[in-house]
Image (cartoon, rainbow, N blue to C red):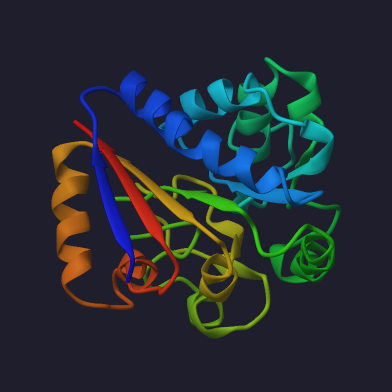
Amino acid sequence: MALTEHRVATAAALAQAVLDWSLPLLQQRLRTEARLSLLLSGGTTPMAFYRLLAQAPLPWPQIDLALVDERWVEPSSVHSNEAAIRAALAVNPSAAQRLTGMKNSAATAKVGVVDCNQRYRELCWPPALTVLGMGLDGHTASLFPAAEGLQEGLTSRTLCAAIHAQPSAMTGPCTERVSLTLWALAQSSRLVLLISGEDKLALYRRARQSENPALPVSLLLGLPCPIDVFWCP
């Protein structure tokens, strides 16, 4: 495990630190590669970073953006990760239009995941960078403990899996999801885990100690690909 930790003082400093760290990596790759992809998570912590990233001097027509996971709700819903990320990227329409969502017209995630896998195979693989968060229940992406579909999400060699989480404070009312699988996350050239607060820091430290499916983030931290963890109080 190639894991590097970065600690910053505030949420605003976190966003800037991730930009300062990631931008040179992306610019360097684009000097030799015609196209690359970035995979983005929802949640409140990464949105300030996305706003900064959208304004960065990057050749956006050469960059694919896509979601790490999504609730099975329409993109117009207040619960939609796609809607939140598009709003953050909207400071630069050239960046916002590069985003590929997961939700489609299928009635359920189990049906819709087939189309989702097909569209995700058309992205540029492996992703240059995948941005992740972590919940206090130990989930990352939509790989929730004890969820229906979790086993597939942890073991399948497809890109996306349908997940039906157990209702909890972490899931809110939207328990039907699509998520990148652990295998798909492992394909990324770099993984970035953004966490904030002392409670999440304590959980992260516990997850680092051993791999445990009851804490899916612990399996992520055991992947062999480089992982950078950014934390602020």
Please report the residue visible at 50 percent of the width from the left and 57 percent of the height from the top. Answer: 190
- Say if residue 66 shows up in the picture: no
Q: Where residue 94 appears, x then y in whole percent?
A: 80, 24
Q: Where residue 108 appears, x then y in whole percent?
A: 74, 62
Q: Nearer the viewer, residue 182 or 80?
A: 182
The total number of labels drawn is 0
Q: Nearer the viewer, residue 171 or 141?
A: 141
* 137 relative to 22 in the view: left or right: left
Q: Nearer the viewer, residue 155 or 57?
A: 57
Q: Quadrant of the N terminus?
A: bottom left
Q: Nearer the viewer, residue 142 or 90?
A: 90
Please report the residue visible at 66 percent of the width from the left and 64 percent of the height from the top. Answer: 126
- Say if residue 208 shows up in the picture: yes
Please report the residue visible at 76 percent of the width from the left and 52 percent of the height from the top. Answer: 33
* 23 relative to 83 in the view: left or right: left
Q: Where residue 180 appears, x then y in whole percent?
A: 60, 64
Single out the residue that lies furthest toward the top.
Answer: 91
Q: Where residue 54 appears, x then y in whole percent?
A: 64, 24
Q: Quadrant of the C terminus?
A: top left
